[in-house]
Image: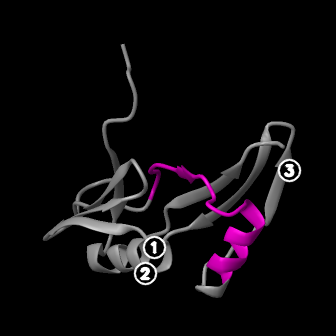
Amino acid sequence: MIEGVANVWVPVADTDRALDFYQNTLGFSLVKHDGKWAEVETGGLNIGLNGREPEGAGSGGGIVITFQPQSGLDATVEDLKGRGVEFPAGVSEHEWGRVVTFKDSEGNDLQIYEPPN
């Protein structure tokens, strides 16, 4: 049986650049940084930033992490825009909620999700 999420690993080309993005742009706290591995705490879930192996999958594929906004989706989007994050598709409205997609410094897809009122 699956009980929940144990780890989330994000493949990155440049661990230091990714760590800078996750710490200074998204505001998460550093847990560990050791060579090609870094880990940040995201409010109850740690995310590992794992350096891509030269023979690995490269930039194709990967995971998507969806975050809950702290102060509403629109305010969070505006805050991140002020930090240089781009949201090319804008906010998408659905009966199950609102979502907006952006990329981290390594080209991985990230999302912000807000459930319906």
Please name whichever residue, 105 or 52, is drawn nearer the observer in this view of the structure. Answer: 105
Residues at discs 2 and 1 in contact (Cβ within 8 Å): yes
Q: Residue flagged by tag 2: what amino acid is it?
A: Asn
Q: CA distance from mark 1 to mark 3?
A: 26 Å
User: Residue beneath label 2, please?
Assistant: 24
Residue placed furthest toward the top: 1
* Residue 41 rendering spot, x and y as whole percentages: 34, 58
Q: CA distance from mark 2 to mark 1?
A: 5 Å
Classify 90 as above or below 117. below
Q: Residue flagged by tag 3: what amino acid is it?
A: Glu
* Residue 6 rendering spot, x and y as whole percentages: 31, 36
Q: Circle 3: is it few (<14), some (14-19), or many (20+) Cα within 10 Å? A: few
Element marked by disc 2: helix
Q: Which mark is residue 93?
A: 3
- Sequence-wise, the earlier of marks 1 and 3 is 1
In which image quadrant can residue 78 be found? bottom right
Tell me what residue is drawn at x 68 percent, y 64 percent: 71
Quadrant location, the N terminus: top left
Q: Which residues are magenta?
A: 60-81
